[in-house]
Image: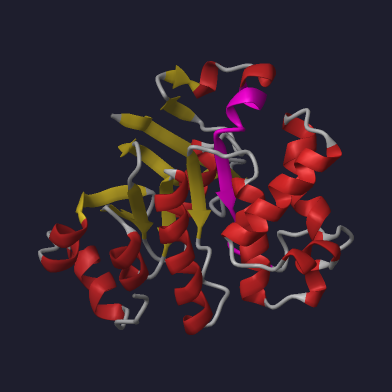
């Protein structure tokens, strides 16, 4: 069963006046007619080089930015037709883990407040219930309870990303967009985060759109892989097919350009 259905999704960003004069405007088709399904419980790996449009596509799926055209359905519901109140309810089930573990956490907030923020906005829990949920989430991502009273600057990059993951899990979502969650980390720490995401998927029954420029990381985590190039999906299939028998020249170049890493 498809949890998320995307059809002919396009995002055009207007640019400045054309260098050829006449006042004409240029445009960038960051996402260009993309259609794909993400099945309940799977990890769809979205891979491509910087500027391919993959992060824009990830944000479009959550309506963090608005598409130019196309359709997005989550559990059969038309996200683009949803009003503010309905989107507020849907956001409980749809979360994001950001690329930058340094910039995505408010440096003025203690960890307990970072994690509690979505609970305060979306749920009516007592202070004790929020504290219990926070403790559960910290344990789930491998952090000690003592972390709750500290500030983000007191943690390493990998620990900050664990805090960001805990925040994303706070509302027990069904679907998470993981937008290059290990690209700002060194290889060994990134491998730990990838293994954590795999563990959490089993534990919480999560569905991921996992965005990365690294084919080896995607190969390890993903059920299926979609390859994105210049705003389009140029190849999509199961992980074994894409990595062992790539049909598109761009996919072959991605495989050749990224060395193997150990994440098991």
Q: In the rendered image, is residue 35 in sight?
A: no
Between residue 62 and residue 195, name the one nearer to us.
195
Residue shown at 66% from the left, 59% from the top: 138
Q: Judge whether 218 appears above or below 136 on screen.
A: below
Q: Where's the C terminus, which quadrant?
A: bottom left
Q: How far from the left and from the top, in percent, is residue 188? A: 48, 83
Between residue 60 and residue 249, name the one nearer to us.
60
Residue shown at 35% from the left, 50% from the top: 43
Q: Judge whether 211 appears above or below 24 on screen.
A: below
Q: In the rendered image, is residue 8 in sight?
A: yes
Q: How far from the left and from the top, in percent, is residue 61? A: 49, 37
Residue 255: which quarter of the image?
A: bottom left
226 displayed left or right of 247: right
Q: How far from the left and from the top, in percent, is residue 214? A: 38, 70
Q: How far from the left and from the top, in percent, is residue 146? A: 79, 68
Q: Judge whether 175 appears above or below 112 on screen.
A: above
Q: Which residues are magenta?
A: 87-101
Residue shown at 50% from the left, 48% from the top: 177
Residue shown at 13% from the left, 58% from the top: 241
89 displayed left or right of 47: right
């Amino acid at each position: 069963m498809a949890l998320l259905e995307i059809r002919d999704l396009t995002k055009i960003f207007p640019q400045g006046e054309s260098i050829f004069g006449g006042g004409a405007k240029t445009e960038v088709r960051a996402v260009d007619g993309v259609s794909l399904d993400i099945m309940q419980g799977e990890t769809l790996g979205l891979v491509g080089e910087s500027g391919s449009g993959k992060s824009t596509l990830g944000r479009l799926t959550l309506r963090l930015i608005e598409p130019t055209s196309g359709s997005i359905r989550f559990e059969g519901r038309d996200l683009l037709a949803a009003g503010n109140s309905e989107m507020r309810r849907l956001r409980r089930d749809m979360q994001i883990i950001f690329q930058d573990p340094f910039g995505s956490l408010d440096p003025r907030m203690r960890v307990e407040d970072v994690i509690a923020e979505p609970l305060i906005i979306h749920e009516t829990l007592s202070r004790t219930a929020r504290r219990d949920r926070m403790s559960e989430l910290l344990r789930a991502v491998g952090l000690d309870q003592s972390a709750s009273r500290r500030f983000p600057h007191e943690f390493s990059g990998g620990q900050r990303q664990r805090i960001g993951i805990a925040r994303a899990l706070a509302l027990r979502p069904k679907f998470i967009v993981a937008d290059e969650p290990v690209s700002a980390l060194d290889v060994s720490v990134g491998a730990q985060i990838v293994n954590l995401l795999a563990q959490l998927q089993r534990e919480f029954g999560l569905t991921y759109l996992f965005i990365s420029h690294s084919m080896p990381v995607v190969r390890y985590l993903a059920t299926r892989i979609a390859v994105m190039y210049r705003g389009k999906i140029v190849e999509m299939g199961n992980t074994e097919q894409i990595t062992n028998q790539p049909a598109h020249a761009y996919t072959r170049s991605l495989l050749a350009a990224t060395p193997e890493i150990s994440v098991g």
